[in-house]
Every structure is written in structure tokens, then in C-alpha cells.
Amino acid sequence: MKIKYLMNQNVTCIDKDQNICDALRVMKKNNISRLVVINTNNEHIKEVVGIITEKDIAKKLGSSRYGNLAPSHFHVSTVMSPNLITADINMDVSTAADIMLENRIGSLPVIDDDRLVGILTKTDILEMCKGKPYEKWLVEDVMSSELITIEPTERMIHARRLMIDADIGRLPVIEDGELVGIITSKDIARSMIAFRKVVPDKYKSARIRNLLVEDLMTQNVKTVKATDNISKTASKMIETGYGGFPVLDDEGTLTGIITKSDILDLIIEMEGG
């Protein structure tokens, strides 16, 4: 299948000179986690210059190096990824999925004759899983059982560092062997914005260092079972907008995590021949 049949033609953009508060506001309003960044040149032509994600914002705002700066001081251009990877409108879905996984990115702006005509995300590709072939595959077949977890009393900056080092977007939170929450890049980015708005500048660095995982985590965690099928799980990701779910066995014990990337691996195998 060609990506033109799955891509979203309504691309949400932001100007490179806007700040990251604006970016997060636009993301929240449109229930998306990334924006294409544009620059309007002297001829009033909108040029695509990068992409900005919640993970990019969390990475920048959680840094002690920028601890005393207000979010409004960060222009989109200083946080975005400028090395833009795009896809041709006639590219196969399996090729696009492979590019995303290889480059560890969540979306591809779609180009037709040098014009931006859409955007393809991992979520869009998950639509492929609604067919019967994917009902035969179970979560336990594709999930990752190598878990990186964190405790609720550990510091947020440690959680952020674990995510950056492992290049992941979420961490299950474990207390006394039980799953008690999950913390994501989105949680860190949005909390940092709110935090920096209310805490006086001279206290920002110290307070950020003392923020705990339990202060930011989501407690009522949505999970899937190891025996759920991939079609059902992909639909759940599309409906909730979540990038991954902790996986529980029949006894309710955490045994793994399944992400959109894990399912994309399967799609490449199934569709790529």
C-alpha cells in the first residue's frame, strides 16, 4: 500500500519564531504530539525547516542547563529537529515504517513535487492492523520484555535521563513489585511548562531537581494483556493516542511493554514480504 492512502492531509504547522508554550498549546488543542515547523520567507512562501515533538520539549526543559529560563524564552527553532526526513507520496508503507524505525522518528512529512502535501505518523500506519491477518498475532509475540522501570520516589530528572539514554518515550513506575503508574515525555514537557510559570526564577533549578516521579506520573495506567491480539491493541493505541502500553500476564504481573514501534516491526515483516 502507498502512504498517500494513509497519510493525514491536514498538516498542523508552527512558525519557527513562535515559542514552545505556543507549540504545546497547539499540540494539546489538536491532540497531536508533533508539529511541522515552517519559515515564511520574503516572498511569503512557507518553507518546511524542521519538526518539533513533545519529546524534544521535554528534553530541553528538563535540562538543568536551562533551569532558570522561562518557556517563553525558547523559540521553536532552538528546540526542533532541523534534520528533516521526508517521504515521497508514492512510497510504500513498509518502506516508510522502516525509515521511521531506522531513524527513531515518529513521523514523516510527505512531499509531492517539492510541496508538503501531508504527514504520515506511526499511528496512521497502525490502521493497517485492522485487517484479519493481524488478529492472529498476540501482544506477547511482538512486545519488548526488556523493561526499564522507575520507582515513584525517584527524581524526575533521573526519569528524563533514562528516557533520553534509551531513546524511549515512557517508563512504567514500579513500587514493591507492583505497577503503580507510568511517566511519559508528554508528562514531563507539560509539567515543566506549568512548573516554570509558577515558580520564581531563583528557585527553579533547585525545585526542578527535587521533583519526583510520583508528582508527574499517571496513576490509572491503561494496560493490555499478553494474550490480546495485535489488531485489538493497535485499535486501542489509535483510540487513546497512547504510544505504548505496559503488558500484564494473567496474574496481573508486568511482563513487558508494547509500543507503536514494536507493531511497526511486525507491519514491515507482514507487508514488506
Image (cartoon, rainbow, N blue to C red):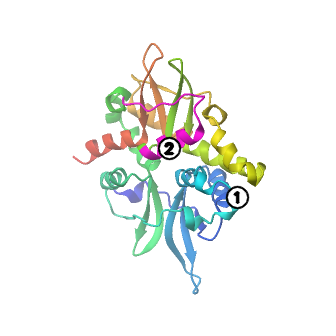
Amino acid bearing label 2: Arg
The residue that appears at 56% across and 51% down in the rendered structure is 54
Residue 107 percent across, percent down from the top left: 44, 55
Where are the magenta residues, as a range?
Answer: 145-165
Instruction: Kindly state the secondary structure of the residue where label 1 is placed.
Output: loop
The residue that appears at 78% across and 49% down in the rendered structure is 198
**151 or 11, nearer to the observer:** 151
The residue that appears at 38% across and 29% down in the rendered structure is 139
The residue that appears at 35% across and 26% down in the rendered structure is 140
Check disc 1: other Cα within 10 Å, few if <14, some if 14-19, many if 20+: some
Residue 207 percent across, percent down from the top left: 69, 43
**233 or 69, nearer to the observer:** 69
> Left or right: 141 with respect to 20?
left
Does residue 167 show up?
A: no
Query: Where on the picture, by quarter, is residue 146?
Result: top left
Instruction: Kindly state the secondary structure of the residue where label 2 is placed.
Output: helix
Residue 229 percent across, percent down from the top left: 39, 28
Residue 243 percent across, percent down from the top left: 49, 41
Does residue 189 show up?
A: yes
Q: 75 above or below 31?
A: below
- Which residue is farthest left? 273
Q: Which mark is residue 170?
A: none
- Which residue is farthest top? 251
Q: In the rendered image, which residue does mark 2 sit on?
A: 161
Amino acid bearing label 1: Ala
Q: In the rendered image, which residue does mark 1 sit on?
A: 70
